[in-house]
Amino acid sequence: MMPVANMNYSDGVTIHIGFDDIDSPSGGCTTHLVYKLVLKWGSRSIKFIDYPGLIRLNPAIPWKTRGNGAVVLRLKVRDIDKAMDLYEEAISEINEYVSEFMHPESAPAIAFYIGEVEDKLKWLGYKAVRDVIPLDLLYRVLAKLRNTFGYHSFSEKRKRGIIGAFSAIGVTLQNTDYTYELIAYRKPEYWGKPRYVTKDSVKFMDKTTRGYTYVNYDYEEDKPLITPHGPDPVLLGIRGDEPGILVKAYNMLEINEPVDGWIIYRTNQLTDMHLRRITQVSKAYIYTGVILKARVSRRPRRIIGGHVIFSITDGISEIDVAAYEPTGGFRNIVEKLEPGDVIEVYGVVRPPSSRHGATINLEKIRIIDIAPKYRFEAPRCPKCGARMKSMGRGKGYRCPKCRYRDSSARKIAYPIPRTIKPGFYQVPPRSFKHLMKPIERFGKEKHKPPQKLYSPWHYP
Ligand SMILES: [Zn+2]
């Protein structure tokens, strides 16, 4: 740790603590560890200056941690000693949490940072949401920071979690869009058992809070989406625009097991933060998310496995776009595209394989301009009405019935009605990934952080 010379502590000290990839033998998770810390520190009147942040990182990278969500706590304490006490306490909590054996693939890590978050760290954080960050880039950024920071990796070999921990600190959600998620946790004796939240109550909650909460239920498959399926301590998660509505939504649910408690996170989920607008196909780098306006250049085709693939072009180069089988009815829209249609695609770029080139994995599509489509037919005879016959290319038509000839007659184009309409279309709720912004959220983007924390933002 470096000495802190240029800071004024009269107003106390701000400490940001980032966590990533913390799991446990019983299937714990980062948010659960943080929930336990919040309850502990909350009961000691430690001041939280923001909601806990749940920061989802680039979903397109292949070596991502489970769910790829990192967490950050932002606190105000009396002095730097107090800040360090909390950091040390968090480390020992994590040691206990991951003790005995942790998943060999995981890379649990914690990081702390004192003071106002510097631009370099913000840059790192937002880059981790949209792009790939090698460890050496992280170390170069850390070397340039002026404020005090530190980190600890709980894995001897794997250090990737440090990137997530610092990225969570860097994504401050101060001038960018954000949403909230209320996560409820189970009592340990229920971990691994089926979750009993009645379907009807989830549907009721979904319908009552529609427009303010998202991705609660998949009506196409009649399946609640708020409850995960793994052995982890998460009972359910409700996502939405306002903390107060999340608490109301939670209270509408019929839950047939004792609940350990819940906490509200401020998050970059449902914001499309992972997507970057580009204007050329050549800028669609693999492992990144893009928004690209282009023209359909190859008609959609359904391949083995039920995936629908088509191609788009910017006039210079071409790239494949895919709507995968699990996206269900969404493929029926995509399949109706025709060459010449102008569209905007939203999705992440998958690397090429031996069987296909780089492919944009479609999350949303905006159909902008539908190209007219024609069927061409020989003209009818003006004398008798029979269908005329061609006399050869460019030589006009003759009537087979009355022998009328017209050397200037041409084929007639009949427009074929197109069955798709301009507008936005998205994958069904069950295919939603954490960062994807639902069409229903367009226009509801936030630009300012909350003025104060909703009370209560956690229970107990
Ligand atoms: Zn005729």
Image: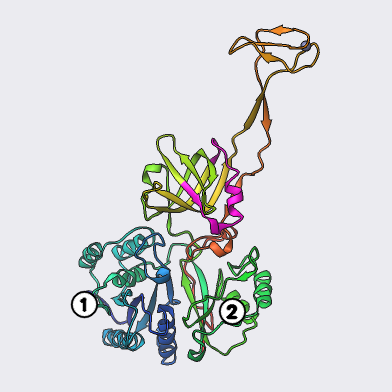
Looking at the image, residue 78 lies above or below residue 354: below
**Kind of residue sitting beneath label 2:** Val
**Between residues 399 and 44, which one lies in front from this camera angle?**
399
User: At which x and y percent is residue 23?
Assistant: 38, 80
Is residue 305 visible from the viewing direction of this image? yes
Would you identify the image quadrant in which residue 329 lies? bottom right
User: Is residue 118 highlighted in magenta?
Assistant: no
**Kind of residue sitting beneath label 1:** Val
Looking at the image, residue 71 lies above or below residue 174: below
Q: What residue would you read off at disc 2?
A: 247
User: At which x and y percent is residue 236?
Assistant: 54, 78
Task: Label 2, secondary structure: give it.
Answer: helix
Q: Quadrant of the N terminus?
A: bottom left
N-term-proximal mark, 1 vs 2: 1
Give the CA separation, mark 1 to mark 2.
41 Å
Q: What residue would you read off at disc 1?
A: 4
